Each structure stands twice: as structure tokens, then as C-alpha cells.
Amino acid sequence: MAGLYLTQLTLSHFRSHKRAIIDVDPRPVAIHGNNGAGKTNILEAISLLSPGRGLRRASADDMTRRPEKLGWKVTALLHGPLGVSEIEILSEKGAARQVRIDGKPVSQTALSRVARVLWLIPSMDRLWIEGAEGRRRFLDRMTLSFLPDHAEISLAYEKAMRERNRLLKDMVREPSWYTALEARMAETGVAIHHNRLHAIKALAAAQAASETSFPTATLTLECDMPDDIEKMRDALASGRMRDLSAGRTLTGPHRADLFGVFTAKNVPARDCSTGEQKALLVSLILANARALAADFGAPPLLLLDEVAAHLDKTRRAALYDELSALGAQAWMTGTEDGLFEAMGDRAQTLLVTDQDGLSSVSSVT
């Protein structure tokens, strides 16, 4: 199986990094340094190699280095199943991001042809105990990794729903204003629902087919909506009076929730310990990566920010063993290099330092 890995990453005026050139080989990359040094900023730059807003969901303006605000640029030399690609992501003075592959301007969705990127960040540790919106976003990121057109379908649904909600808030009752919008919402909403189910099925198969030291999670999509386009259109039409009272659309994939269960214990993920919840998340990311390796032709780039948090020494060693077996280039961060000791020479190490507000990156091994 061909690999997917970076050999060079260049950051220019990106977040805390005025100028950083990172040369690496295909092995996993362990990044360490003090809090605030700029470790996560490196992972965020890599996350932009996939469609979407990146792991922080930040605007282009938020990513520019202060106080200069000159704009920023991220350049990556990516090796994958289709060969070697030079990817440039840039923003001029806070303007919308531009994407180039091998010098040619392309849309963000074109990135999915050459790369797949998954991430696990500290804010996701509370996934199972916070609101449904975060779980939908988590599921949609996994779905997007399998089905790149999921992003465009979701945007089309959200646009139609915003227009319908505007009519509802204005108390518009004339049916003709709603017909075309509801037809679009029905078509895209059912597609979103089916895409999510496809992703859950792929994850379940990947978990069942692999031996892992991490607990498996049984996932269920809870969504009170028809899975047929015509029935969905009828449900939106019949629900207009209720939606008028609420001032918003109350039926559709935007109301879905992801329910997870610790399979071996038959305990809902929300009731598990903090360590178990973290282990379940790691398990799902690894399952997603294994499924993509078969689907895309190479394991994805993995971004694991502060991955050692809530994992004991045994589970950290198990994670590193599974990453090595998978053959993925995982970019991991931690405050101490000792957190990655179990990786040995299977990984390379980068030290990130911050002096007088200027971040620098140096290769250690």
C-alpha cells in the first residue's frame, strides 16, 4: 500500500510562526515544547490540507500572525497514492483562503483527491458529555473523510434551511414560498442522513475486523426524520405550522445526535470515566484511519494534539504500536519528549520553542 506523508511543511506568518521550514521523513512526528510555544499551530496548518475550516474552525483572518497581519501561507510537499503534490494554502490580509495544487488554483474540495486528514484535539475530550452539535460535527468530519462531496451537500442543505428559517421568522404562510426550498432540503437532508449512516457502518466494520488495545464503541445515529426524499418533503410541508411557532425548522439532519456505547461494558459513553471516554475517541480515530487506508489507498495523516492526556503509560505504548502497524504519519504534540519515549526510533522529534514572541522549530531526531 502506498503511503501518505509530508516531507516538508513551510509556515509563513501563520499564527505564532513568522517563518518555519519543517523537513521530515515518513515516520510519525513527535512535537514537544512548552505550552504556548506553537505546537498546535503546526497541526492546524496541516489540517488545512483537507476541506473545511481546520481543526480550530478559525477564519483566515484569525490565522494571520499578529501584529503584522500581512496574510499567511502554508506550503506542503505531500507524497500519496497519486504521487507527489505541492500544496499551497494562503490568505492575503485576512481574505478567504486560496488553494493551489502544483501551482494551479483549485477549490478546497479538490484537496480530497490527494489527501485525507484526521485529528483528535483536547476540545473533543468532552464530546460525549456536551451538546449534540459537537457530536454532529465529529461525525460529519468522519463522513467527509469517506465521502468528500458530503461538505457541498451539507452547505446546500444549510443554505436552504437558513432561507426557510427566515421565512418562518417573518411569519410567511404562503406555501409557494416554501416549495422549492423544502424540495432542496429534502434531497440534501436525506443524502446527509445516508452519508452519516455509511460512515458509521464503515467504522463498525473497521472496528470488528481489527485487534486493538482500545475499547470499541458502538455508534447509533439518533435522528427523527424520514429517510426517503418524498416523505421528507411531506414532513417539512406538514410541519410548517409547528415550525412557524418555533421560528425555525424542527425536522432534519441538523437535529440528529450521535450516541456511543462502550461495547464491552454496554455502558453509554457519556457515563464512562474520563480515561475511558478518551480511549473510545482514540479507538474511533484509529478505526476511521484503518477504514480509509483500505478506501483511499493509504492511511490518512493523523493529527493528535496532546494525545497523551488521560492515557496511562500502557495505553500510550499501545497507541504508538497501533500507529506503527497502521503505517500512518501521525503528528503528535506534548509538553515533554518523555511522553513519546515508547516510540523510540519509530518516530522523529521536533522541539518548538518561543523566545520574545518568535516561535522556532528544530529537529531533534
Image: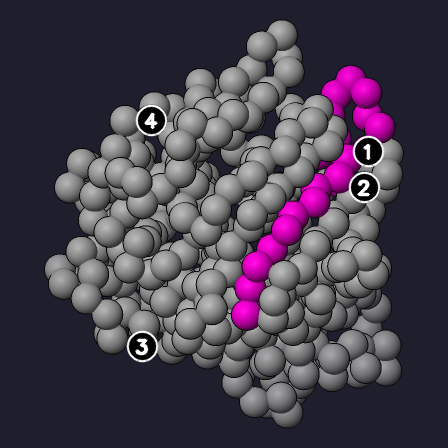
Q: Nearer the viewer, mark 4 or mark 2?
A: 4
**Mark 2 and mark 1 residues within 8 Å of each other at the beta carbon:** yes
On screen, 257 above or below 134? below
* Magenta stretch: includes residue 61: yes
| Point 56% across, 89% down: residue | 228
Q: Residue furthest bottom?
A: 230
Query: Label 2 is placed on what type of residue?
Result: Ser
Q: Determine which of the numbered discs, if any, sits on residue 337 in the image.
A: 4
Query: Label 1 is placed on what type of residue?
Result: Gly
On screen, 31 above or below 107? above
Q: Nearer the viewer, mark 4 or mark 3?
A: 4
Query: Label 3 is placed on what type of residue?
Result: Ala
**What stretch of residues is rendered in magenta?**
60-81
Query: Label 4 is placed on what type of residue?
Result: Asp
Mark 4 and mark 3 lie on one chain; the one further toward the N terminus is 3
**Mark 4 and mark 2 residues within 8 Å of each other at the beta carbon:** no
On screen, 2 above or below 51? below
| Point 27% across, 47% down: residue | 320
In the image, taking residue 37 as reference, residue 333 lies left or right, namely left
Few, some or many residues within 10 Å of mark 3 (<14, 14–19, 20+): some
Q: Determine which of the numbered discs, if any, sits on residue 71 in the image.
A: 1
Asked which secondary structure carries label 1, the reply is: loop
Asked which secondary structure carries label 2, the reply is: strand
The residue pinned by badge 3 equals 205
